[in-house]
Image (spheres, helix red, strand yellow):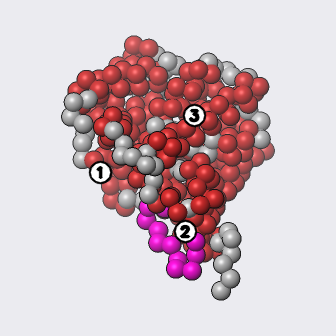
Amino acid sequence: MRKSSIPLGAAFPVTVPVLFGYLAIGIPFGLMLVKAGYPWYLAPVMSILMYAGAGQYIAVGLFSAGVPIAGMLVTILMVNIRHIVYGLSLVDKFKTAGRWKPYLVFALTDETYALLTGVKVPANLDSGAFYGSIALLDHLYWIAGSVIGALAGQFIPFSFAGIDFALTALFAVLLIDQLSRTGDLLPAAIGLACAAIALVLAGPANMLITALAAALSVLVLVRGRAS
Amino acid sequence: MTTLTEALIAVPLMALVILATRAFPFVLFSHRDPPKAIRFVERFIPPMVMAVLVVYCLKDIRWTVMPSGIRELAALALVVALHLWKKNAMLSIFGGTAFYMLLRAVS
């Protein structure tokens, strides 16, 4: 069998769960963006360049609140800092990825990370091209989902009230996954307490960056020595 | 609200920040082991940030006015229950969101 340079067919079955997942999370993102007052084409621009579920949802909130760009960048850094963790465990796996490596690093989302750490490369395929095809398909699903959502928001007069709860659910799910992996409740408890206090003291518009800064300080104080 | 022009400037910059978080370990630790400070980031920061973000999502609830966040907490409970039961992220997110939209529609 001839080796295809981009084995999308072999990668597709692996990515089916992400197809449904990215449509389910991408559509609400597109809807939220349009409901916040932005044109539909900002959705694919964000999905192509940023390609980060949590980051893009948070960006819509930052846009709506009119946060200055510096504040946006710091917040996005904190929200996406978990990606450093993903990379650490894939450094060896990507060493053989060849020319696909830059794209694989760029496109490393929660879901693609989960697929790449779990999947086995078929014997007749180059690992870089196989991983790259998985990452590329996931990226396309995400772009498609956000465009469908944005166009639906722009042209379908249906009430999508409450669709933004998908974001709350996404974060809750990521939190549960992390807690079940580490078995350590303290960092989450610190985050919870700092966020609640920041909400009361700083108000809804300024709570995110206040809470992140406070929780990071407390975390360094109580756990800085432990590591 | 951020203007469209500002948003179009901010998006590539945010994309660069996200790319930096993804590229960081590959650039720095391809040839040596990560220092202890990175282990700290790895172990403690992600769950802390996620807990903050869950509260952030609930920031606009007016607790003193009925229905006072009951719908959000009920839907959140369903997400947690579904996820502990089935361990399927998509099912938990989709189920919880559909339930929440239903609650919004009937109340």
Quadrant occupied by the N terminus of chain A: bottom right
Give how far apart the Cα atoms at labels 1 and 3 are: 28 Å
Name the residue nearer the viewer: B23 or A214.
Answer: B23
Residue sticking out furthest to the top: A201
Q: Quadrant of residue A40?
A: top right
Position of residue A220 in the picture relative to residue A162 (left or right)? left
User: Does residue A167 appear anywhere in the picture?
Assistant: no
Marks 2 and 3 belong to one chain? no
Q: Amino acid at mark 1?
A: Ser
Neighbour tally class for label 3: few under 14, some 14-19, many 20 plus, Cα within 10 Å: many
Q: Which sits in the foreground, A163 or B41?
A: B41
Residue visible at 24% across and 36% down? A227
Give me the residue at 56% from left, 61% from top: A97
Label number found at residue A127: 2
Q: Chain of mark 1?
A: A
Mark 1 = which residue? A180
> SS at mark 1?
helix
Q: Element at badge 3?
A: helix
Vertical comparison of A226 with A149: above or below: above
> Label 2: how many residues lie within 10 Å, few (<14), some (14-19) or many (20+)?
some
Gap in angstroms between the C-alphas marked 1 and 2: 30 Å
Residue under numbered circle 3: B17
